[in-house]
Amino acid sequence: MRFTFVLATTVALALSSATVLGQQQGPYSVSGSCGGLPKVTSFHTAPGLCAGLVASGLKFPRGVLPLKDGRVLVAEMIGWGTKNGRVTLLTPDGKGGYAKQQILKGLKQPHGLVQGPDGKIYVGVVGGIKRFALGNPEQTVEDVIGGKAAVKGPPGDGRHPLVSIIFTQRKTLLVNVGSVSNNCERANGDLPKPDQICPETRAPAGHGLVREYEFDWATGKAKGWIVFAEGLRNSMALVEFSASGVVLQGENSRDSIDDLMPELPNDNDLPPDELNELTAGGRYGWPYCYGANIASPEYKDKDCSGFHPPLLSLPAHAAPLGMAYWDGGLAVGYHGYRDTGHRIVWFPVDAEGKPKDEPKELVFDWVNPDGAPTDLKAGADGALYVTEDRNGTVLRLGKE
């Protein structure tokens, strides 16, 4: 009996120690501490960095906004086609975690989340942009673009309806208007006519572009918009380098190019996704050209020389959905579900904020479960906050 008791006690202590050393929290294994949070051990980080688990159990989180006081806002999309998205406030609980509080609901697929020059919170929803005062969200929420506002919002239809947004140093708002199609095919799948302009790119409700909205900040009202840049299939990742005003865009390039190029075994390596420097009035080639100004197979005779080439080519189907200037460089999240995705990379930048040289991987071997980074934003504490939709988490990447 004594031997049985000692054996049982030893097993119990071993199990207890294992629990302390390594636990499962949400989708991840955690062990130890990273910035006062449970340290994620399910993937690797670059030397000197670690990832802390801020929150799990979120429903398809997209936009993230770390606030100066240590709280974090998250746009929970809930799912595709839904109108019950919400904004959730995460508040440090003093115990190494965050308390969740739903502060806004009934949103149509919320995605972009930023703080405006007026201090209010702006959230991009399908078809428009709403804003609210953080101290009283439900009573102050209003349509500022689209919806009941006087200024029309993006169309909100087609294959890429989600709205990414950033404010510029000029206090204007850049808004993604994603393409209806993959590469201008018709609704029935027929190819576009190679000698005609792609119909979905035509004004006044053109797709595949970035709009720039101007505001009258004395009243807080949006005044109207212009096309800032066009020929961009889906601009989920947008960021401005404040010191120079350079605007970068992460282009999610087309799929299934191998359907029109029978010499390819698949589309795993073509076309590349892109990092583009956006300039006012710039034209970037979609759907007529891809990569370094190469004619698309639908438009094989197109002269692509007049379009802006990419600043950098990214791996095909990496799907850059979020990026942020952080730790002296540019961090980019690769959301893609193929082998090129599931990671966060970091590019060194020049004095203007333009990426240069090869990137290094900040988060990698992120395959159990598959990493799905969506939005990235730098916090006032010097850490990088990351949402990932498929796993329903917010992560904090910081110094070891």
Image (cartoon, grey):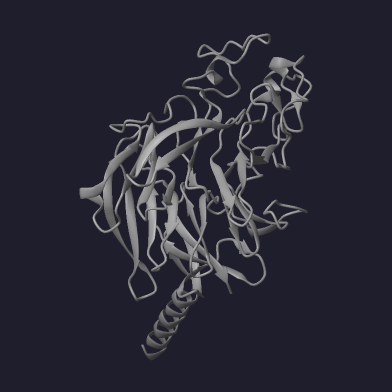
Q: Nearer the viewer, residue 278 or 40?
A: 278
The image shows residue 307, relative to residue 338, as above or below, that is above
- Tell which residue pokes out farthest to the left in this image: 139
- Tell me the residue at 68%/8% (across/down): 195
Q: Residue at x 38, y 91 (%)?
A: 2
- Residue 231, quarter of picture: top right
The answer to whether residue 45 is above or below residue 10 is above
Left or right for 354, reference 124: right
The quadrant of the rendering that contains the C terminus is bottom right
* 265 left or right, relative to 133: right
Residue 306 pos. (x, y %): 74, 25
Q: Where is 281 relative to 380, above or below?
A: above
Q: Position of residue 85 (x, y in %)?
A: 32, 42
Image location of residue 134, percent across then percent down: 30, 56
x and y, in percent, of residue 267 in the image: 69, 30
Please name the residue shown 37% across and 65% down the image. Answer: 71
Q: Is residue 382 above or below residue 386?
A: below
